Amino acid sequence: ALELLIVVVILAVLATVAAPNLRDMLVRNRLASISGDLAFDFAYARSTAIQRGVRVAVCASRPPHSSCDGTAWGEGWMLYTDAANDGFTSGTDTVLRVHDPLPAGYAVTTSPAALVVQFRPSGPADALRTFQACFAGFIGREVTISTTGRVSSAAMTGACS
């Protein structure tokens, strides 16, 4: 019985030490996943714009993702064709992909502030944009869209606030 008690105490100490590291690993993996999703969706939007010869946009959108009604990227986003260059018009434009809201505590911000990113049929983006996927206290990930439409992802230089 004494041996069992010692084993239980040792396991409790190990679990106490390992739990914060496990949480940190899960947060870092989730940030990598969010930034990967953003980078993929922007690259997909650019590629589709080139292939179809129409403007393709990505906008902040809330479920059920039937309009560009989002007020923050963390609420989710949708990719759509924008042939008339007039924003999303149900019945005229085609929704290509959607991304559901981020888990609680995670956020995506953009600089300069924008809720829509457009790619022209030849591939360029409407403007240079930097997106930051964050969880307070962690070093987040950045996704950058150049004016030529090139998408890149990297770790941020500082911790999220």
Image (cartoon, helix red, strand yellow):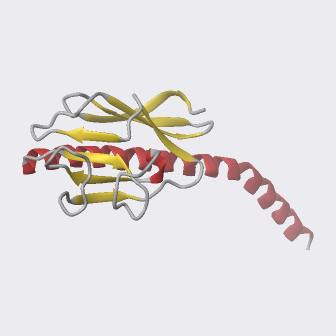
Q: Which residue is painted at 33% across and 54% down in the image?
A: 78
Viewer can see residue 40? no
Give the left or right position of residue 110, taking residue 120 as reference: right
Observer-nearest of 7 and 142? 142
x and y percentages locating residue 39 in the rendered image: 32, 43
Observer-nearest of 101 and 113? 113
Q: Which residue is painted at 19% across and 49% down in the image?
A: 82
Position of the C terminus, as image quadrant, is top right
Position of the N terminus, as image quadrant, is bottom right
x and y percentages locating residue 143 in the rendered image: 37, 36
Quarter of the rendering containing residue 67 = bottom left
Viewer can see residue 148? yes
x and y percentages locating residue 60 in the rendered image: 39, 48
x and y percentages locating residue 80 in the rendered image: 24, 53
Quarter of the rendering containing residue 142 = top left
Give the left or right position of residue 14, taking residue 29 as reference: right
On screen, residue 4 above or below 152: below
**Name of the residue lying farthest toward the top:** 157
